[in-house]
Amino acid sequence: MPDLSPSPSATVHDGRARSLATFDAVAARHGWRCVYCDGTASTVDHVIPRRLRKKRPDWLPRINAPENLMPACETCNLMKGGQDVRHFLRCDPARLRRLVRAMAAINPGALTMLDGADG
Ligand SMILES: [Zn+2]
């Protein structure tokens, strides 16, 4: 079980030490596969994009929640960028449903957490 507590050298919401620990935990949970293309995951994607932190500071807990962190390959992470995941996966609704189910498996509240997240 990786230690997810922030190390003294890492800030609470970001920082390399914490990012590496988070990646291991998130990727292991999904068999090291990208949730968007099933390729090999090498990054952690924020399903609700981090850029919304500025617009919706009240969403910080939701943005940093475990269910919002999914493994992604670098290509998909870059392609998705700050897009709403429903827009990014608009041509692949089956994959979007699987992703939402994976989020709900971590937190049943995730089924509604995307609501209003299209800013
Ligand atoms: Zn991918």
Image (cartoon, rainbow, N blue to C red):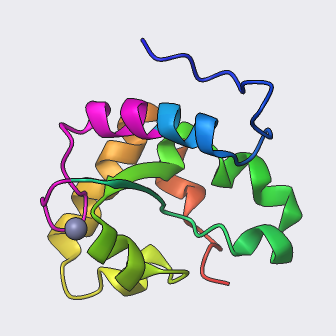
Please tell me whether residue 84 is drawn above or below residue 29 in the rendered image: below
Q: In the image, what residue occupies the spot 60% across and 81% down?
A: 118
Relative image position of residue 82 (x, y in whole percent): 55, 81
Query: Splitting the image into 4 quarters, where does residue 32 fall?
Result: top left
Q: Quadrant of ligand 1?
A: bottom left
Relative image position of residue 85 (x, y in whole percent): 43, 75
Please tell me whether residue 119 is drawn above or below residue 23 in the rendered image: below
Q: In the image, which residues are magenta? A: 23-40
Relative image position of residue 81 (x, y in whole percent): 48, 80
Q: In the image, what residue occupies the spot 61% across and 35% down?
A: 17
Q: In the image, what residue occupies the spot 72% across and 24% down?
A: 7
Is 26 in the magenta?
yes
Is 67 in the magenta?
no
Please tell me whether residue 65 is drawn above or below residue 7 in the rendered image: below
Helix, strand or loop for the magenta stretch, by majority = loop
Query: Splitting the image into 4 quarters, where does residue 4 fall?
Result: top right
Query: Splitting the image into 4 quarters, where does residue 49 fall?
Result: bottom right
